[in-house]
Image (cartoon, rainbow, N blue to C red):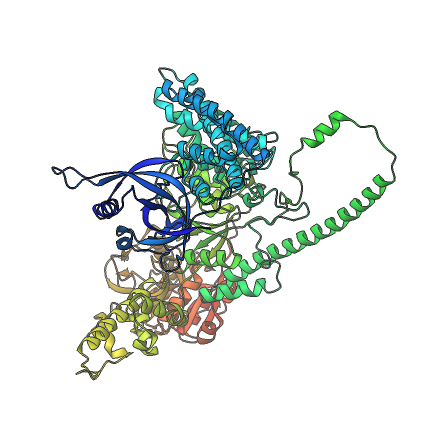
Amino acid sequence: MATSKLSVLALPHPLILLPASRFTMPVSKEIGETILGLIEESDALPIVAAVPLTNASNSGHEKGEAALSDWGTAARVLRLVKPPARNPRQPYMVSLHGLTRVRLINTSAHKKPSSEDLLQMPVHDVEYPPTEKIPTPESVSKFKQCALKLLDRLAKDSLQQSRKEGYTKIAEMLDDITPARTPWMADVLIGSINGDYSDKLAILSTPDSEGRLQLASEIFIKQTSISEVSKKIANAVDESLSKQQKEYFLRQQLAAIQRELHSLQRSAGTSPVGGGLPSSNSPLGGGLGDGGANGTGGTSATGSELDDDEQHEADDLADLKRRIEAMEPGSEERKMGVREWRRLKRIPPGSVENGVIRSYLEWLTAVPWPNSAPLSTVSSLNATSPDTTSIHPSQSPGSITTSSFLSNARAQLDSDHFGLEKIKKRLIEYLAVVRLKELNAAREEAEEAVISAKDKVSFNTEMSSKDLVVYDKDKTSNQNSAPPFSVSSPSMRQKKRKAVKGPILLFVGPPGTGKTSLGQSIAKALNRPFQRIALGGVRDEAEIRGHRRTYVASGPGLIVQALRKAGRSDVVLLLDEIDKIGQSNFHGDPGAALLEALDPEQNHTFNDHYINVPIDLSQVLFICTANSLDTISAPLLDRCEIIQLSGYTYDEKMHIARRFLLPKQLTSNGLETEHVQITEPALLHVATRYTREAGVRSLERAIGGVVRFKAVEWAEWMEEKDAAGKSKKDYKSVVEEHELEKILGIARWDGEEREREERRGVSYGLVVMGQGEGGVMPVETIALPGTGRLKLTGSLGDVIKESGELALSWVKTYAYELCITNSRSEDPLKFPEPIDIHLHLPAGAQKKDGPSAGVTMICAFVSLLTGACVPAHIAMTGEITLRGRVTPVGGIKEKVLGAHRAQVTKLIIPWANRKDVEHDVAPEIRREMEFVFVKTVQEALEAAFGKSVLTWRSPARAMLLESRL
């Protein structure tokens, strides 16, 4: 091969000069002066090596770098035009004529030239290819045939007569050309047509005449196909245009492109790129189009995901169609999807109705239908073996069926919450049932697989032994037109199992007791998605059931929205603050709309007004939360399994503060564990004196205040450190009890519950505060001159007022037996002197009501009239009847916890509430307190005042009288 040295002129992307081609290009001032110097030095027109600069993506170099191609063209400089003197900023214009191919040799040191080097047109060693061989007749014939077809298509598509004549003359020349000149003609034609940059670069890099003709033939075939499709699309668009449709020109063009792509795919016998069903088997008509499933049509590497181009639109429609085809054949949702899809294709894309139908289809396909095929399965039909079993998204292999599932779930609940044993027990029961169901279903599937395998073997044996049968063309064609997979095949569709219906749990308790976070822990233990719906203030039925599609801007309800976000049909759905939902009004009753969703016998066909297709909610685990049951309707309560969450004990609060609250606050405030250490007495003081609640939210805020105070001290200490790492004052990480007043201020609660006194006419009752926490409240009575009336104060309700009158009536009835009066006919409020009794419950700003203060009021009246005092360490609760019975009351656990907080050691509780104490109160609290369970008022008085303290005139007389009416 001949070699020489030529100055290299870099052609910027996408310029390529082929042999026998000419073009004029602008060059910079430096390159223009270099070429001018070459012209002045040479006697004839100079020859340079025109080498294209390949872009970074094609050359494999780092981003931003350019590389010289290995092949270029030896070009003669025909003309160089200087910029005019009046405008020196214009570039030089150089005209080049391609002569022959050249290859750069010894380019290891010049493979990555800088921009400065290219401006100087460096001299490189170049190698000329050998003399071209005469190509074979087959290649020449194929080349001429492809070239003539392309020229004929270009002549037909050209609108200018001169161009048509030019293509005709080239075609005539091509017929008469010799085989030795066909490679030269290939270069001429490739340089003339508007081809791709990569095609021209490939032609330039092919010195072999045989290979060049084959490559040129392929390029001509591709260009002919592109020209035919473009002309066909243009004709189709022109025929459909009218005066009313001109504004939809671009959309019509897009539709024509999609039709051509579908026809090409069908003719090639391949399934669409999106992975959908073939057009002959799909009720939606046609394949899925390009992109979509594999994401090729998504955001490009250089574009933005916000770019609204045609490819994104096509991908969205393809994905929508793929989801419809994934639905179970024959199901209501698929029928609705197919019907709406056909309506969508008939309506012009720019109309309002098109957007409404498309929004509906997006919501319909986004709902996780239980029996739909997984999308990954639908998008990879050809790569899936017929014996492969698909796994439903809700089944994570090795989770529910593993032997450690229950222990892992219990550990998850224990790590997230301290205590709450009753709730954890109920959840473990549910998880155990789910696991057993899954194990049974797996065993049944294994048995069915063994049976089916045996049947298949016997069937094959039977078929092999049969005689020949008559060929049925119709039957065979029907078999050939069958879908590529059977919807009942285990490889394509999950077999429907008898799954466990999700329970409807209702957590009732004070704020801050962990109801909402408990739902999140349940979702983690089950390995399910978690969604929360806030029902507080919801007053429209459509928020639950959805709006009907006839309304403008209609949409589905909150339940369907939660299912779409979760993406699975077995979501853990938390209905938060269900007791604060709006009442019935002209918008409907949202509470009544929940009846269908929360009924295990009905929610498998839940009807959303917008979707208008029955939705199966039987696998959803509903968890409702409420602070009170008073505002929840009876039918709704009947559908829920109520689980009470009472307040935490101080021992539980201390554990929660150590395990959860303090580490959380340290992380939130940028401190480490060694920076803040709160002592046990200090933490207990914070819990008892600075907070009074059933939950732990105020405790967390108080701990946060302590941590922030220490964060300020730590930051100041870090700023004051000198170069030696020492500070003027030392940082103390330990927080003592005596420092809390400086950090948090004066204690909000001064412990008046503990500062009780033993006094005449005073007894202590157990109450439940407004926030759900229990406490001890004194019942104070005094006697003053009057007319025998009873005065009640303290913001009392009607029920508690009746309890006071009932208690006084009982005391008057048994005043003689208690030695208060000297005869049965005397009134203790009028003999020996007329008096009035004033009963008061402190904290008059707080509303008080409820049937649980009868025993406490009787003890206060008896103490006032007899002079005996109730010990300060005794508290009581319970309602009474006129016959002297003590009836059960509610809120026992909260009341016991409040008494324990107030350091009460003895409690008087109705006998009927004994089961509540044994079931709800923690064993460590029961061991620290004495419980006296009473059935009658006499037993309550003896337990309150002690035996032999009260003098009874007729102790043998039964205090419990039965009516004989």
Q: Nearer the viewer, residue 800 or 102?
A: 102
Q: Nearer the viewer, residue 889 or 366?
A: 366
Instruction: List x then y, in percent, for residue 724.
Output: 20, 84
Q: Nearer the viewer, residue 955 or 310?
A: 310
Instruction: List x then y, in percent, for residue 684.
Output: 33, 74
Q: Residue at x 83, y 28 (%)?
A: 470
The correct choice, above or below, for 450 with respect to 26 in the image is below
Visible in this render: residue 778?
no
Instruction: List x then y, in percent, for residue 280.
Output: 61, 29
The correct choice, above or below, for 228 with respect to 750 in the image is above
Say how many tags the image has: 0
Visible in this render: residue 583?
yes
Looking at the image, the residue that sits furthest to the top is 243
The quadrant holding residue 717 is bottom left
Looking at the image, the residue that sits furthest to the front is 43
The quadrant holding residue 950 is bottom left
Instruction: List x then y, in percent, for residue 447.
Output: 74, 51
The correct choice, above or below, for 205 with respect to 151 in the image is below
| Lateral position of residue 498 relative to residue 219, left or right | right
